[in-house]
Image (cartoon, rainbow, N blue to C red):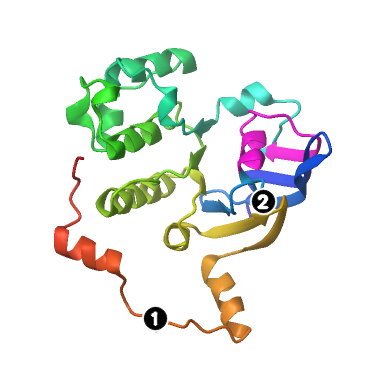
Amino acid sequence: MIPAPIISVKNLVKKYGEFTAVNGISFEVNRGEIFGLLGPNGAGKSTTLEIIETLREKTSGEVWVNGLNIDESTEAIKKIIGVQLQTAGFYPNLTLTELIQLFVGLYQTQVDPQSLLKKVNLEDKANAKYKQLSGGQKQRFSIATTLINQPILVFLDEPTTGLDPQARRNLWDLIKEIRDNGTTVIITTHYMDEAEVLCDRVAIIDSGEIIAINTPNALIDELVATGFEKVKEVKKANLEDVFIHRTGKAWRED
């Protein structure tokens, strides 16, 4: 038996006055996959995710998360999802341990801060203040906080923006590990190479509508089948691969 999707969106609409930000989209996210929602700025992807995350009200349509209707079970949904906060969402003068304890209190759960920090290679920063972290460390800590309530579903909003190649590749490994441990991951990114490597499936949204949805490989094959050819010869590696190979893949701090 095929398991029910963890997210089901049907004819979702979000309007702001006369402007339609999300225009009747429908899609499903399977359990245990990394699903990418891609699109240019203003396409409607952030609005869509905020509705699923229970942070924004929809105009019409249906949204189900783990079999729960978003209109009827908002609080229950909040307990089973993890949402990545932007860096401005953390108190800069608190230590990482203090911040984790703060979130633990909000979630009313039990978590060992050191064990959680070890998952994102920050155990040696347990007593460091948040403001003392590098950009990559802040991103890793932000992802760690999504796991505090042991969610079955996490939302990551452009998690590698602004990071150097080593930090970006290591975050890819972390995101895959989260998925491999049984948590479904929804990710937005403007890096198409990142989506191609990480995502089991992607949906491309533009002007509030989904214009394509499939595995990255299938979407690429569809384009090639139209006769599309790259001007530049495709090589087996790219410049980022050269950078990583020459400088190493170990964690580095800014």
Residue 52: give x, y in percent of width and height: 65, 36
What residue appears at the point 73 percent right and 29 percent down from the top-left corner?
Answer: 57
Between disc 1 and disc 2, the foreground one is 1
Q: Which residues are magenta?
A: 46-64
Residue 241 seen by the camera: yes
Q: Is residue 180 left or right of residue 228?
A: left
| Residue visible at 35% across and 20% down in the picture | 100
Tell which of 163 and 71 is nearer to you: 163
Specify few, some or many for label 1: CA neighbours under 10 Å numbering under 14, 14-19, or 20 or more: few
Mark seen at residue 234: 1
Count of numbered circles on the image: 2
| Residue 1 appearing in the image | no
Q: Is-magenta flag for residue 205?
A: no
106 over 192 or under it: above or below: above
Q: Amino acid at mark 1?
A: Val
Callout 2 secondary element = strand
Residue 250 location (% of width, % of height): 17, 50
Above or below: residue 130 compared with residue 49: above
Q: Is residue 106 left or right of residue 62?
A: left
Residue 86 position within the rendered picture, expressed as x and y whole percent measured from the top left: 45, 31
Query: What number is the disc on residue 28?
Result: 2
